[in-house]
Amino acid sequence: MGKSLLDVAAAPGASMAGQWPAAAHGVDTETEDRDAAELFETAFSEAPTGVAVIGLDGRFVRVNSALCDMLGRSEDDLIGSTSARFTHPDDLQTTADAFTRMRDIGHSLTVEKRYLRPDGQVVWAATVGIGVKGRDGEVTRFVSHFSDISAVKLAQRRQAEATALFETAFADAPIGMGLVALDGRWLKVNRVLCELTGHSEEQLLRLTFQELTHPDDLDADLELVRQVLAGAIDGYRIEKRYFNAAGEVIWINLAASLVRDSDGEPLHFIAQIEDISERRKLHAELRRLADDDPLTGLWNRRRFREELERQVHRCQRYEEQAALLLLDLDGFKSVNDTYGHQAGDDLLKQIADSLRKRLRSTDAVGRLGGDEFAVLLTHVTPEQADQLANTLAELIAASVIHHSDTQIGVTASIGVELLDAAATTHHDAIKHADAAMYRAKARSATPSRP
């Protein structure tokens, strides 16, 4: 290598790490300097990171093998050259400024910069330069340490890219996005969430999700939050209601997941919120079309039979008492034949409205087709069922319409089938009620004896 460290770094009157103290009385100064130089030689050569001795002109005077390996260059290639020769073009000015400052202030300075290997690979290094002073206190050269931080920079870049990607996805998401603290406070919200709730960003950040949530939906949501925090589930989805800034109810689909730190401790929730108010309205309308009789608005045959089947199961399992009433209008065909189908339809709607108003909210009423209706009474005794059947018969007889100057009405035959723990199937219930209805019709058609 030509010169030893004793030549390049321990010249008479100079030291490698600042000014040496004066030799103690009776100590051989030359021997002390030689020992110090040999110690530095070992530390320099065996250092696991790059080390270089650099002159005041910025040229490498001495380099160790670790630096050669890091830069992918030989010792001969480095010695006599300045670091600018191997520095990334974008960092040249940074390098020049750092060297000038280090030379002026005379003590250590750290700079992060990029070097280029012969194969074009970029190496990030954290360089720490230390000024070496002679006994006169003047800096004579520098010792620089080079640590390869390429992996750290790569991780930082990926983190920055991931953060930028998240920020973009968060801000520009077509649905509402929010970061929610563990106590429910909004920490960060996007534009769509503000538009969805009708609140400004500043307003939302002063609120909690609990304050937006409809009271009837809050307990279910909080229970899911509890399960997530307890580690029972990773996240959850729920359809629930919010109040917007105007106090109106909006339906949302919420997907929430928990973000944890590197130690696994909960940090906050990330919430994705979609406005499904229109979808709920459409679903309700489709359900109504599927369940309701288009003329009367009562349940249709399919929907009524579904409810009847559920009631039969409740009777069997919980020993409830219920009753099925089948109602057939007497003489309805003559109304259509005499006054037309419009009059018949008006009469059916009048009867349906009368039945709806008379029955309890827990009861069910449907139009099975034509002039046949069905009523499902819950939690009734046989006596109550018979009494209500008579009441409904009177109600139907009183449900008249006026056509021109004519008052039009009909009577009804009603069959009653009691449902209890012995009930079998909804098919049997309908069959038995139908038979009872025809017996009632036969009795009404039989003239009474004088």
Image (spheres, helix red, strand yellow):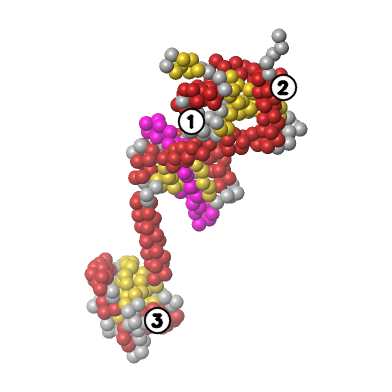
Front label number (1 vs 3): 1
Q: Are marks 3 and 2 in contact (CB under 8 Å)?
A: no
Q: Are marks 2 and 1 in contact (CB under 8 Å)?
A: no
User: Which residue was labeled with disc 3?
Assistant: 69
42 over 391 or under it: above or below = below
Q: Earlier in the sequence, mark 3 or mark 2?
A: 3
Q: Position of residue 409 (x, y in %)?
A: 53, 18
Does 260 appear in magenta? Answer: yes
Depth order, front residue of 264/211:
211
Q: Callout 2 environment at 10 Å: few (<14), some (14 to 19), or many (20+)? A: some
Magenta residues, start to end: 241-270
The quarter holding residue 398 reads top right
Q: Residue at x 58, y 35 (%)?
A: 301
Magenta-colored segment: predominant secondary structure: strand
Q: Residue at x 32, y 67 (%)?
A: 111
The answer to whether one can see residue 41 in this image is no
For badge 2, the amino acid type reads Pro
Does residue 176 appear to the left or right of 104 in the view shown? right
Does residue 60 appear to the left or right of 222 in the view shown? left
Q: Secondary structure at mark 3?
A: helix
User: Which residue was labeled with disc 2?
Assistant: 382
Depth order, front residue of 107/239:
239
User: Which residue was labeled with disc 1?
Assistant: 295
Q: Position of residue 364 (x, y in %)?
A: 59, 28
| Mark 2 and mark 1: Cα distance apart in space | 32 Å
